[in-house]
């Protein structure tokens, strides 16, 4: 199967090499992706290696609280992310972009509260209690771990973009997730649009891989 990923992406190759044993090869000549041979190759993007099934250290299954991030994900990129503390298992991973399954657990026992974000803005923690039943399903996710070179963060962050359109935010809820594989290293970009385009490709790739039975079956581990 040939997927049509023939987007031109404007990437500055400032690859984060910290703990990056995979060292993906760059394929500047290809402008379409072939998924069938276990590799996704896209022009100007490091290649994504797809294994028949998750390889160690995956699967990594955790349940974590959602903390406030920079507030850039929704407002600037249109790609909201749930920021989570970097716990041991995540800290041991190479930095980069990952994929898997996720699910939100609201806390109906908690009332709304407010918290000050890093940028000084007050945000309301609704603990996930505004979400409706169909938003509490298991969804595919993409996860970014690292320093966001495009924004030059001073702190390492872990964030999850759940691939679903939510009607409300869910600060203060818990997120359960299972990480199944690695897509690419974090990159720097010449424009915000290029970053957005690349994240959308990550989403496309994640959905593609997660639809394979050997990856889809891990959804069951998040069922109550
Ligand atoms: N930030 C970067 O600086 N470089 C990246 O390559 C990058 N890739 C990302 C891929 C995904 C799937 C997601 C969800 C985020 C990525 N980010 C990246 C982080 C992005 O800059 C961050 O979510 C926003 O700045 C909000 O904190
Ligand atoms: Mg965020």
Image: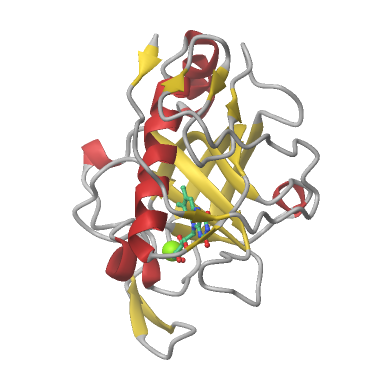
Give the residue displayed 50% in from the left and 67% down from the top.
Answer: 67
Give the residue displayed 32% in from the left and 73% down from the top.
Answer: 112
Q: Decide: is 115 above or below 58.
A: below
From the viewer's perspective, tell me whether residue 168 is left or right of residue 110: left
Quadrant of the displayed image that contains ligand 2 = bottom left
Q: How is the image coloured?
A: secondary structure
Give the residue displayed 48% in from the left and 71% down from the top.
Answer: 69
Residue 107 position, x and y percent, is 40, 56
From the viewer's perspective, tell me whether residue 58 is left or right of residue 220: right
Q: Tally the numbered discs.
A: 0
From the viewer's perspective, tell me whether residue 203 is left or right of residue 64: left
Q: Quadrant of the N terminus?
A: top left
Report which quarter residue 16 is drawn in. bottom right
Q: Quadrant of the C terminus?
A: top left
Residue 44 position, x and y percent, is 50, 42
Front residue (pair 160, 5): 5
Give the residue displayed 52% in from the left and 40% down from the top.
Answer: 45
- Does residue 212 appear anywhere in the picture? yes
């Amino acid at each position: 199967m040939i997927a049509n990923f023939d987007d031109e992406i404007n990437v500055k190759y400032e690859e984060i090499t910290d703990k990056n044993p995979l060292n993906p090869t760059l394929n500047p000549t290809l402008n379409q992706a072939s998924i069938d041979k276990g590799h996704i190759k896209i022009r100007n993007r490091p290649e994504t290696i797809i294994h028949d099934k998750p390889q160690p250290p995956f699967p990594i299954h955790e349940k974590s609280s959602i903390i406030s991030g920079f507030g850039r994900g929704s407002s600037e990129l249109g790609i909201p992310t749930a920021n989570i503390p970097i716990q041991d298992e995540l800290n041991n991973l190479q930095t980069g972009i990952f994929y898997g399954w996720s699910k939100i657990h609201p806390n109906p026992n908690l009332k709304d509260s407010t918290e000050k974000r890093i940028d000084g803005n007050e945000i309301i923690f609704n603990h996930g209690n505004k979400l409706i039943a169909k938003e509490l399903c298991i969804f595919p996710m993409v996860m970014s771990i690292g320093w966001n070179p495009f924004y030059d963060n001073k702190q390492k962050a872990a964030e999850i973009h759940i691939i679903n359109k939510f009607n409300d935010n869910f600060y203060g809820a818990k997120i359960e997730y299972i990480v199944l594989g690695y897509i690419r290293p974090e990159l720097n970009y010449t424009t915000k649009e290029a970053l957005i385009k690349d994240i959308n490709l990550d989403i496309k790739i994640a959905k593609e891989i997660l639809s394979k039975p050997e990856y889809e079956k891990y959804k069951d581990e998040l069922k109550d």
